[in-house]
Image (cartoon, rainbow, N blue to C red):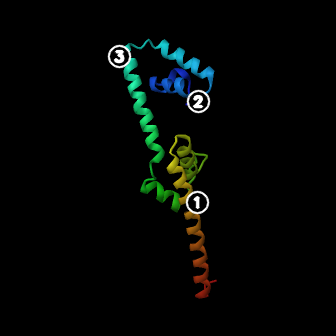
Amino acid sequence: MSDKKIYRYTNVELLDVIKNSQNKVLVVNAQAELEKRNLTDEELQYTKSEYLKYLEFKENRKDESLTREEWLSFFILPFITPKPKWRNDHFTDSEYQRFEKYGFDKKAKQASEVQTLGILFWFVLFIVCLVLAGYFNLL
């Protein structure tokens, strides 16, 4: 959330900053922004209930596993990821960084393990191809 202006934060994000941020200046700014919005008691209660849902979702995503598509992308493309002209990063690297940034702890751990297995797979496949090529005198 640090890359956007305080006025762009949702009410739930402001409440999260107020309750959890270590940056005192940010907390003061978030409190001022929340007060500036002149929320009614009903809206404030709704925001608090949404905040509790947000915390529950945040806690649940720590234990979320990789999907089949994510697993395959990390296994098949561990280092030969496509790098389009409009991006300056690789897909698997950016996905791994996203997992770490947004608290997908289990996904980040699994992605690292699967990426290692993918590298090992491609290495073994390369060695097997070399051995087969040597056996059939293709080299």
Q: Nearer the viewer, mark 3 or mark 1?
A: 3
Q: Residues within 10 Å of mark 3 (few under 14, many from 20)?
A: few
Q: Relative to residue 1, is residue 88 depicted above or below?
A: below
Type of the residue with mark 1 = Ile
Return the x and y of residue 109 as percentages of the image width and height.
Answer: 54, 53
Residue located at (50% from left, 45% from top):
104
Residue pointed to by mark 1: 80
Type of the residue with mark 3 = Glu
Q: Residues within 10 Å of mark 2 (few under 14, many from 20)?
A: few
Of the image marks 2 and 1, the number of the one nearer the N terminus? 2
- Helix, strand or loop status at disc 3: helix
- Helix, strand or loop status at disc 1: loop
Of the image marks 3 and 2, the number of the one nearer the N terminus? 2
Q: Relative to residue 67, is residue 5 depicted above or below?
A: above
Q: Nearer the viewer, mark 3 or mark 2?
A: 3
Q: Nearer the viewer, mark 2 or mark 1?
A: 2
- The N terminus appears in which quarter of the rendering? top right
Dots 2, 1 in contact, CB < 8 A: no
Residue located at (48% from left, 24% from top):
15
Q: Relative to residue 100, is residue 43 depicted above or below?
A: above
Of the image marks 3 and 1, the number of the one nearer the N terminus? 3
Residue pointed to by mark 2: 2
Return the x and y of residue 18 as percentages of the image width and height.
Answer: 53, 23
The mark found on residue 42 in the picture is 3
Distance (Cα) linking label 3 and label 1: 53 Å
Residue located at (49% from left, 57% from top):
73
Distance (Cα) linking label 2 and label 1: 32 Å
